[in-house]
Amino acid sequence: MKRSLLLLVAATMLMAACTMVNPAASNMINITGANLTSNMKQGEDCATVVLGIGPFGQHPSAIAAAKSANITRTAYVEYQFKDYFVFRQTCVDVYGY
């Protein structure tokens, strides 16, 4: 009985997700149907966290993403968070000229 309760508590703790607060975006507009990426360069910088350990590599930054695509004028920045069972990938995409 105690062992099964201990296993249940341990499994619950392993499956519990961490929370992350992202700042609200300002100057939001409706861009439905707009082709924003035409004639733009795209740079990406990602980091991966496995079982809460990491990130492997540096934290993703818009500056590193812009440098990877030789972007000197940034049009917009997009953040992506991909959560899987044992790891999380965080990416920053920068679009510009």
Image (cartoon, helix red, strand yellow):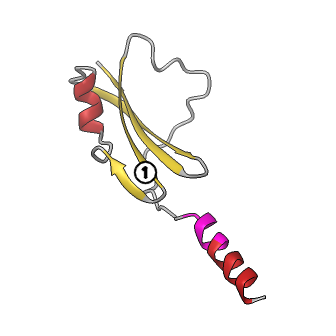
Amino acid tagged 1: Val
Residue 75 located left or right of residue 84: left
Q: Quadrant of the N terminus?
A: bottom right
Residue at 40% of width from left, 58% of height from top? 53
Number of numbered discs present?
1
Check if residue 84 falls in the magenta segment: no
Residue in front for this viewpoint, 94 or 90: 90
Residue reaching furthest right? Answer: 1
Looking at the image, is 43 positioned above or below residue 29?
above
Majority SS type along the magenta span: helix
Secondary structure type for disc 1: strand
Looking at the image, is 85 positioned above or below residue 19?
above
- Image location of residue 7, percent across then percent down: 68, 76
Q: From which residue to which does the magenta span run?
A: 11-17
Q: Quadrant of residue 79?
A: top left
Residue in front for this viewpoint, 78 or 26: 78
Find disc 1 in the rendering and name its residue: 49
